[in-house]
Structures are given as C-alpha cells and as structure tokens.
Amino acid sequence: SQGVTVQELAEALDVSPNDIIKRLFLLGTPLTMTQSMSDDLVELVADDLGRQIKIVTPEEENTFSFYDDPKDLKPRPPVVTVMGHVDHGKTSLLDAIRHTGVATHEAGGITQHIGASQVMINGRQITFVDTPGHEAFTAMRARGAKITDVVVLVVAADDGVMPQTVEAINHSKAAGVPIVVAVNKCDKPDANPDRVRQELVEYGVIPEEWGGQNMFVNVSARQKTGIDDLLETILLQADVLELKANPDTFASGYIIEAKLDRGRGPVATVLVNRGTLHVGDTLVAGMSYGRVRAMLDQHGNNVKEAKPSDAVEILGLNSVPAAGDEFRVFEDERDARDLAEQRSLKARIEEQNKVKHVTLETLFSEM
Ligand code: GTP
Ligand code: MG
C-alpha cells in the first residue's frame, strides 16, 4: 500500500526526521524525507524508537463491524456446545444423538480437541461442538463457549458438580450463553439427579421448575434414554433466541480447530456464522490465508458451500491458523495476503520484544 512519508512519520511520532533517516539507513533501506515507507518499515522503525504502531488496513478495520440490513437476515440453525467435567459423558451423549461411536475410539477415553458435527433432528439442523473436560483444556472450553448459541452442560448424576462443571458455567456466563443442563448417567444405581439440581443452584444455574432460567433434562447416554427430550429442549431454547444471519454475503466465522496434515497440508475446521463460504473463496484466518481448494463435511464428503452455522473442513490455507481465530473471506486475494502478512510481521515483532524482555529479566536475576 501507499505508505506515509518519512516526514509524516517523524511528525506523527514527534521525533526528528533525521532520527528516522538514520534508522532506515541502519536497516539497509536509505530513504529521504519525502519518500514513503512500507507499512512493514513503519512498524520496524517505530519499534526501534520504542513506539508501538498498529497499522490498520481498511479491511482490518471492518473485521469487527459487519452490518446487515435486517431484511437480509434469515433464520439459521443453532450452534450447541457440549461442556462439563471430565468423563461425565459429553462425547457419549453426542454419540447417542448422532448414532456414532466416537467415545470408544478416543485415546484413553479422553477428548483432546474440539469436534464439530451437524445433526438433523426432525428436519432441523443442530451443529454440535464437543469440548474436552480434562482440566488442561481451559482455553478450548473458553473458545467453545464463545462461538456457540447454547451450552449443554453435562453433569454426571453419580458424581455431581465438579471443578470443570463450575468452570464451564463461568465460561458460559462470561459469553452470555444460555445453559441447558443434561443430567447424565441416570442409569447408575447411585445416580442422584436431584442432588445435581441442588448443587447447581449455588452457581446460579436454577431449574425452571424452581423458578429459575435453566431447563434440565435427565438422560442416560449409555441406555439412550431422555435423548429426544434433550433435543427438544435444545431446540426450544434455540427458538427463544430467534437466531438469524445474512447468508448472501462474504463468509466469516471462526476456526474451531486446525492441523497440518501430511498429505493435504493445513486443514482447518471452520464454523461459518455469517455469509456463505464457497470453494474458490479467498480467506484470511489469523496469520494465514489462502484460497479454499476443497471443502469437506464431517463425513469427509466434498461440499461446494457452507452456510451460516455450518461447520466444514477446508483445505488450501498457506499455514495452520490458531484455533479460535476469526476468519473472513476477501474479494481481493492481494488484500487477504497483505492482511495475513501484516499480522505475521506484527507477531514477529511482538515475539522479538518478548525475547528482549526475557533477556533483560534474566540479566537482573543474575545480578
Ligand atoms: P472427556 O471428553 O474426557 O471430558 O469425557 P466425556 O465427558 O466426553 O466422557 P465420555 O463420553 O468419554 O464418557 C466417560 C465414561 O463414562 C465412559 O466410560 C462412558 O462409557 C461412561 N458413560 C457415559 N455416559 C454414561 C451413562 O449415561 N451411563 C453410564 N453408566 N456410563 C456412561
Ligand atoms: Mg469427550
């Protein structure tokens, strides 16, 4: 892009232009007062002068300010994240809903990633997001709560409220997301679903029948009881929210998870929350960008487009984005690349600053 001149930057930073010219010279890019600098150079020089400059492109400025005319909004399916303490039966519950057997194939019986799957219930779609209950995965739970419309809090009726149950409640409340409670393992002889209700009151999760805001359903993922009731309750809760999105615009949403696949390169699972994503679209996700080469549903089938609330795997990014990154489709491939590169540069500068900082601290600790 057409950057600011040396003189303009000097004025903006309130330093002498000669200071900047000197630094540019040391960086191997001699320039005069009236020549313009690239964004990268501006950030580097400012950083050299101990200043933080954030160059915001018009694209970036728009990232968080989407506007849709209300008449363009159409109903969209709910995104539902399943959360709860480790081993309380989140994945088993999803297996019962999907008629799958994921839980039995997980290493150590522990979920270690966020998984998304779409289910049709009486002709209505629900996009489910599974999360790990293990205490190590706090960040994944926080992200799971952020991207969802409804949280299903799974609490084992024989175990009751445990630390990650409370953590999940806190994430949901922080994200302002309603909680439906699935009291699981009701088949167990020592199950006490009423005790779960009493315990949850302490954390502000109160059953409707007790005058609270939360719907509770007793289930058994193992015996597949209460499942239809739970699904109906989820849809009821979703209806209250009147979820809508504009499907007829450039897609945006979140990276749910991403990895480097040996054969296919960077693979990312994305959740669309606005617009429609097509094969061939160019997108930016955090520091990575690329053209969508292929798009796959949860069964590995090729699909051509993904609408609001759909979760799909995409191929074609130039690097692996971070889970939780926002993604956005760009009309112009060059804008996409510029934004991704600017973000990488900024991250590199921040990384360098961190290294300097650590060195300094190390120095002091040795004195
Ligand atoms: P993490 O993902 O690691 O947090 O665990 P999870 O909450 O997904 O639990 P998972 O579905 O893996 O189930 C944990 C254990 O509980 C497994 O041995 C399941 O077979 C068992 N389990 C799950 N649901 C039920 C149930 O309704 N009744 C009984 N008796 N056992 C269940
Ligand atoms: Mg699990």
Image (tube, rainbow, N blue to C red):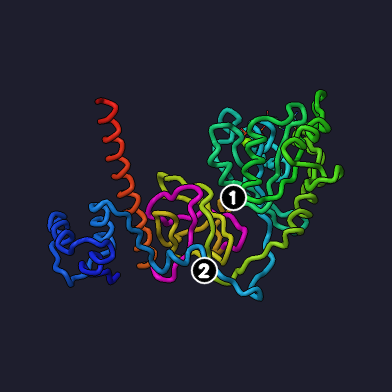
Question: Within 10 Å of the Cα at label 2, are there few (<14), some (14-19), or many (20+) other Cα atoms?
Answer: some
Q: Judge left or right: residue 132 versus residue 337.
A: right
User: Which quadrant holds residue 21?
Assistant: bottom left
Q: Quadrant of the N terminus?
A: bottom left
Question: Within 10 Å of the Cα at label 1, are there few (<14), some (14-19), or many (20+) other Cα atoms?
Answer: some
Kind of element beneath mark 2:
loop
Is 231 in the magenta? no
Q: Quadrant of the C terminus?
A: top left
Q: Nearer the viewer, residue 55 or 242?
A: 55
Tell me the distance, in whole angstroms, between the alpha carbons under discs 2 and 1: 21 Å
Compared to 12, does 112 lie above or below?
Answer: above
| Circle on res. 81 | none
* Residue 262, x across and y down, in percent: 40, 44
* Residue 191, x across and y down, in percent: 80, 27
List the residue tagged with mark 1.
146
Is 312 in the magenta? yes
Q: Nearer the viewer, mark 2 or mark 1?
A: 1
Can residue 29 be seen in this snapshot? no
Q: Nearer the viewer, residue 330 or 194?
A: 194
Q: Nearer the viewer, residue 252 or 48?
A: 48
